[in-house]
Image (cartoon, rainbow, N blue to C red):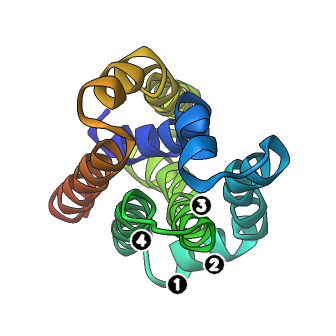
């Protein structure tokens, strides 16, 4: 399960912009289409990085790839939280998408190396379960956090959790 914790961030960041869209529209005075693209940039880079993700997992190894992905997504989350313009917010979301895009494939590689092939389905399913719990955390818990401390502070804190996931990955994965 620990190996799947970084994957929680993947789903969290997929859903998170929807929770703060009204605040982003007010802050950046953008239209729904502009803010839809702010959310979609995550998916654009995620899609483009799937083949490079496998190459990185094979060449650098899953440990380094996942750790690097967590660090980049954490930086993107902090950058997003500190954004003073829509362009900066786009760059933050781009970094988030870039970072999380290289997490799932290395986790699957770990599942094939650490576990008996008969357990691959269980392990990949567990990874998906943990990942989807990130989407749950990006719903009501994120909304409550944003109401209490604001969207900017929330994304900075989420960035700190991303760094924690990077440290956890670096220490646990071998």
Disc on the earlier residue, 3 or 4: 4
Measured in 3D between alpha carbons, the distance from the residue under mark 1 to the one under mark 2, in whole angstroms, is: 6 Å
Q: Is residue 25 left or right of residue 128?
A: right
Up the image or down, 5 lies above or below 46; here it is above
Measured in 3D between alpha carbons, the distance from the residue under mark 4 to the one under mark 2, in whole angstroms, is: 17 Å
Measured in 3D between alpha carbons, the distance from the residue under mark 4 to the one under mark 1, in whole angstroms, is: 18 Å
Measured in 3D between alpha carbons, the distance from the residue under mark 2 to the one under mark 3, in whole angstroms, is: 17 Å
Question: Which disc, if any, is residue 72?
Answer: 4
Mark 4 lies on a secondary structure that is helix
The quarter of the picture where residue 115 lies is top left
- Which residue does the numbered mark 1 point to in the structure image? 59
Measured in 3D between alpha carbons, the distance from the residue under mark 1 to the one under mark 3, in whole angstroms, is: 21 Å
Which residue appears at 53% of the width and 35% of the height?
20
* Labels 4, 2: front one: 4
Mark 3 lies on a secondary structure that is helix
* Labels 1, 3: front one: 3
Q: Is residue 11 left or right of residue 152?
A: right
Q: Specify few, some or many for label 2: CA neighbours under 10 Å numbering under 14, 14-19, or 20 or more.
A: some
Q: Is residue 88 left or right of residue 151?
A: right
Quarter of the figure with the C terminus? bottom left
């Amino acid at each position: 399960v620990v190996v799947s914790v970084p994957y929680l961030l993947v789903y969290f960041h997929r859903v998170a912009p929807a929770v703060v869209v009204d605040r982003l529209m007010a802050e950046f005075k953008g239209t729904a289409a502009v803010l839809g693209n702010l959310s979609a940039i995550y998916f654009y880079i995620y899609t483009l990085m799937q083949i490079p993700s496998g190459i990185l997992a094979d060449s650098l190894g899953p440990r380094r790839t996942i750790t690097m992905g967590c660090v980049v997504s954490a930086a993107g989350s902090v950058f997003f939280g500190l954004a003073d313009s829509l362009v900066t917010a786009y760059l933050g979301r781009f970094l988030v998408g870039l970072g999380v895009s290289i997490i799932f494939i290395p986790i699957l590689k770990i599942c094939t190396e650490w576990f008996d092939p008969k357990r691959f389905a269980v392990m990949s399913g567990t990874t998906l379960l943990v990942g989807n719990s990130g989407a749950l955390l990006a719903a009501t818990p994120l909304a409550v956090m944003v109401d209490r401390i604001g969207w900017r502070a929330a994304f900075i804190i989420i960035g700190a959790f991303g760094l924690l996931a990077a440290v956890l990955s670096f220490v646990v994965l071998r």
